[in-house]
Image (spheres, rainbow, N blue to C red):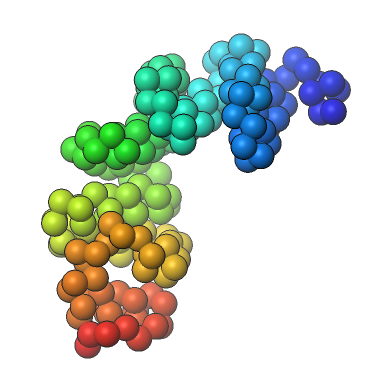
Amino acid sequence: KAHDLDSRSGLTSLYIGKVFHLKGEIDSAEYFYKKAILLDSNSINFHIQLASFNISRKNYTEANLSLKAGKLNPNNPYVHLNYGNMYYFLERYEEAISSYKKVTELLDSDNRAFYNLACIYSIQNREEEAFINLEKAVERGVSYDAINGDSDFKVLRKNQDRWARLVKAHFNINTPGK
């Protein structure tokens, strides 16, 4: 109905695409995301949203094309966040690290880049760097359930004393360890 009322608005098409995406109607979501870009190709946010959609579908070639279009503004942290996500899923960890670090420079308050840095460092057994970034992510709002249920942190949980201190300090939960 919104589309019938405002069919020439890129923003309306974007929101309709998001609704279809959430409902799992992928073809319709893709149609409206692309329509939003056709209506306003200069909107970096539209390109970023299409990239995020394609990353969720593991369509990295299309995501990369959208992100390249979004690179028109190299200071947009969400371009770098989506590049980081794409590289993370492709297990190109050094490129992901570089992208996530750029996000932290541009938008220090966003917990996702710090969280994903912690995941990568943990996977790479770089425990000190993982704990430092996990601490920053938690300080910016990542929940106990998120960190406790994430298999990427199994290396960190092996350091029971340090894990217990982090959990106690930020969530006031006692875990095994000191």
In screen coordinates, is 7 left or right of 87?
right
Which residue is at a point 20% across and 80% down the rendered structure image? 161
126 or 61, nearer to the observer: 61
Task: Please identify the quadrant where the C terminus is shown.
Answer: bottom left
In this rendered view, identify the residue nearer to me: 150 or 41. Answer: 150
Q: Is residue 133 visible?
A: no
Give the x, y percent position of residue 37: 59, 16
Q: Is residue 56 left or right of residue 105?
A: right
Q: How many marks?
A: 0
Query: What percent of the width, then of the height, locates residue 74?
Result: 37, 25
Q: Residue at left 37%, top 20%?
A: 61
In the figure, 85 relative to 7: above or below? below
Residue at the location (27% across, 79% down)? 165
Residue 158: percent from the left, percent from the top? 19, 72
Does residue 117 sit above or below 130 in this rendering? above
Q: For this rendering, which residue is in front, 98 or 31?
A: 31
Residue 14 on image: x %, y %: 65, 27
In the rendered view, tell whether residue 127 sits above or below residue 160. above
Using the rendered view, name the quadrant where residue 131 is placed: bottom left
